[in-house]
Image (cartoon, rainbow, N blue to C red):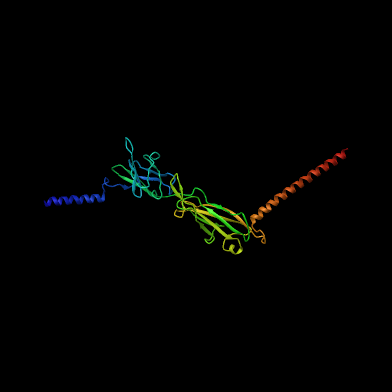
Amino acid sequence: MLFQHSLCLFFLYIFIILWLFNPIPVFFTHESDCVRLTNMTVPPVQDVRSEMPLHCQFDMDNEQLYAVKWYKDDNEFFRYTPSSTSDIITTYDVEGVTVDLYRSKCDHVSCNLWLKNVKKPQTSGAYRCEVSTEAPSFFSASKTHYVTVAALPKEAPVIENLKTTYSLGDALHATCTSGLGDPKPVLKFYMNKQPVASTIAKDLNLDPTHMETWSKTQLSRSKIQIRMILDRKRGTSTPWNINSPTEILCTSNIESLNSLLVPHASTNQTFVVYDPNQPIRNHELGYFHHRSNGNLMGSRESWLIAFCLIATFNYYHSYNTISLQ
């Protein structure tokens, strides 16, 4: 009895040592350099009103593909298993994920999915593509990318009520309105690339939401107003020019989204503040004024020279005719 117990312990130790130095692949899959994900693309920011594409491309390096699996936040929602008779596609219930099987397609080198009925925030999350090989190797490879679902404004912000010219001492009143979005867009005013102080540019309250019926999405828009007196005292703190163009810029962005992934939408206009007691110093205005006068003067001089040449020609022609007679 003691001998049998010792023999069992001996084989148990041998099994543990062999497993530590040469794990049995039937129980586990492990990452391999042989199987590679060559390309995985998902939209970093997905519009809630559109279907979402997921693309995964891989190189099996002569290994046999066992399965392609897609996960959201470590929850499997799609599996593709190739077969010699017919491929097997399996979907699993995961909140915020609905695979459009008619548009989706997988094969031995890639797996492209389309998600429909995108929802905010349920569809946002970490998406992982994982490929694995058949026995006996059971190699695997995977990549993960994060997706944020939002409703980006479809149009640039609009500046209204801004005049093209003002006189020194006038009041400047202008507004900027964003497009509809979710989250609510944030607007900012700039003058000559310098941010306008919050004491001058203020938010205006609008209707809280707008329901887009076809997508069942609640959208919001923002509006800000700039009010200031164009006098010399305020001009020292606010970077606007006198007798030269001033650029006013309005930007719209979603603060919760990375500006590198979603560039700011913007619109700009220019205005000029005239001071009748100060000469125009802007070289561009002077250049265009001078160029306009120069073109007019050049046209007059050309006609005068042409007239003189014609008159001279007619004089000599008449003189030669009289001499011959």
Residue 240 appears left or right of 214:
right
Residue 283 appears left or right of 207:
right
Residue 307 appears left or right of 140:
right
On the image, the x and y values in percent for residue 248 come to: 57, 55
Furthest residue in direction left, as rendered = 1
Quadrant of the rendered image containing residue 103: top left
Furthest residue in direction top, as rendered = 85
Asked if one can make out residue 193 in the rendered structure from this viewpoint, the answer is no
Viewer-nearest residue: 8 or 228:
228
Residue 171 appears left or right of 32:
right
Task: Residue at 84% x, 41% y: name it.
Answer: 318
Viewer-nearest residue: 28 or 117:
117
Give the position of the C terminus as an image quadrant: top right
Furthest residue in direction bottom, as rendered = 233
Task: Residue at 71% x, 49% y: name it.
Answer: 296
Asked if one can make out residue 285 in the rendered structure from this viewpoint, the answer is yes
On the image, the x and y values in percent for residue 260 come to: 47, 53
Q: Quick check: 104 above or below 156?
A: above
Task: Residue at 58% x, 63% y: name it.
Answer: 234
On the image, the x and y values in percent for residue 21 come to: 26, 50
Furthest residue in direction right, as rendered = 325
On the image, the x and y values in percent for residue 15 come to: 21, 49
